[in-house]
Image: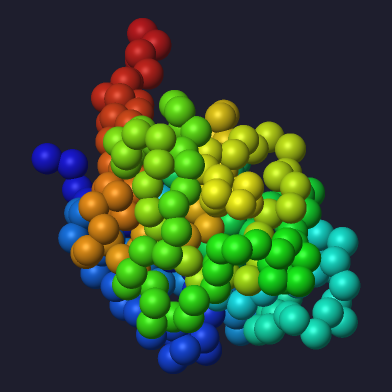
Amino acid sequence: MTAKPLIAVTLNAAELDRMVHWRKMFDGLQTVGAIPMAVECASAIADLEHTVGTVDGLIISGGGDVDPRRWGGDPDDPTLSWVNPVRDENEIAAFEAAWNRGLPTLAICRGAQLVTAARGGELYADLPRDFPSAIAHRLGEEALLETAHDVDLVEGSRIARWTQAGTRMKVNSQHHQGVRRLADGFTASAYAPDGLVEAFESPDHPVTAVQWHPEVNWGSCEFSYRILDGFVESCRERRASTLSKVTGRSRTRTPVAL
């Protein structure tokens, strides 16, 4: 029996008091058979390449806004909140280390925006101002337990395969920024009815990003549960593959010269 996969979860501990449902992420990961490991990223530069080398998967979690200087935005924009360049640097280092290792990565909300900025994409700094829509994308932390709006899934995408939801499903929502332009190497996998990119992925790497929060409402939303389960299964498969390669090498002995 393969051991449970160990998944690093990046976060800013100072923000947890206002993220009222954050504990549900760790409960959810344990429920679907993973061991979550919190990685504080906001207070000091860490050797995250080493940390990523010890785990089976990476989750870049939600939180404050990404430093707009990373994607060409205005650092004095009055709509920005909780910008932390140290967290940005640490999480980008973790993401790049995971990318180089082929490590399954799930980027959630801020995480999706961070990946976009890190790889040369562009964000909407404030959706109500820059992308007016009849859809309310930011409903408050308490509202994350309920679904907010539909998303249309791209057929054959990783999210579509994980959820088995067909072409449309409902998601929760709590964000005021969003993807204006995807970074090179990524394809959209879900859209809101107003056309906003709600999820994207890499066709060549096991990186999946969602703008909503399946880590919060997995207990009441079957599709959110399936996203966590699908992600953890990909981590489990990678762990098994890695262990198989290591075991195979250990059994191969160098012939002794006679």
Q: Quadrant of the N terminus?
A: top left
Vertical side of 61 occupied by 142: above or below: below
The residue shown at (39%, 77%) is 143
Q: Position of residue 103 (x, y in %)?
A: 47, 43
Q: Quadrant of residue 94?
A: bottom right
In the rendered view, tell whether residue 222 sits above or below residue 253. Answer: below
Where residue 30 sits, quadrant-wise, is: bottom left
**Horizontal side, residue 85 vs residue 59: left or right:** right
x 61%, y 84%: residue = 43
Give residue 73's position: percent from left, percent from top: 85, 66
The colour scheme applied to this rendered structure is: rainbow
Q: Is residue 4 left or right of residue 241?
A: left
Residue 28 seen by the camera? yes
Q: Residue drawn 87% across and 61% down? A: 72
Instruction: Identify which residue is drawn at 63% across, 47% down.
Output: 195
Q: Residue furthest top?
A: 258
Residue 80, placed above or below residue 190: below
Horizontally, is 220 left or right of 81 in the view? left
Give residue 81's quadrant in the image.
bottom right
Q: Residue 172 at x, y = what percent? A: 41, 64
Decide if residue 66 is in sight here. Answer: no
Kindly give the residue lying farthest to the front in the view shown: 134
Count the labels in the image.
0
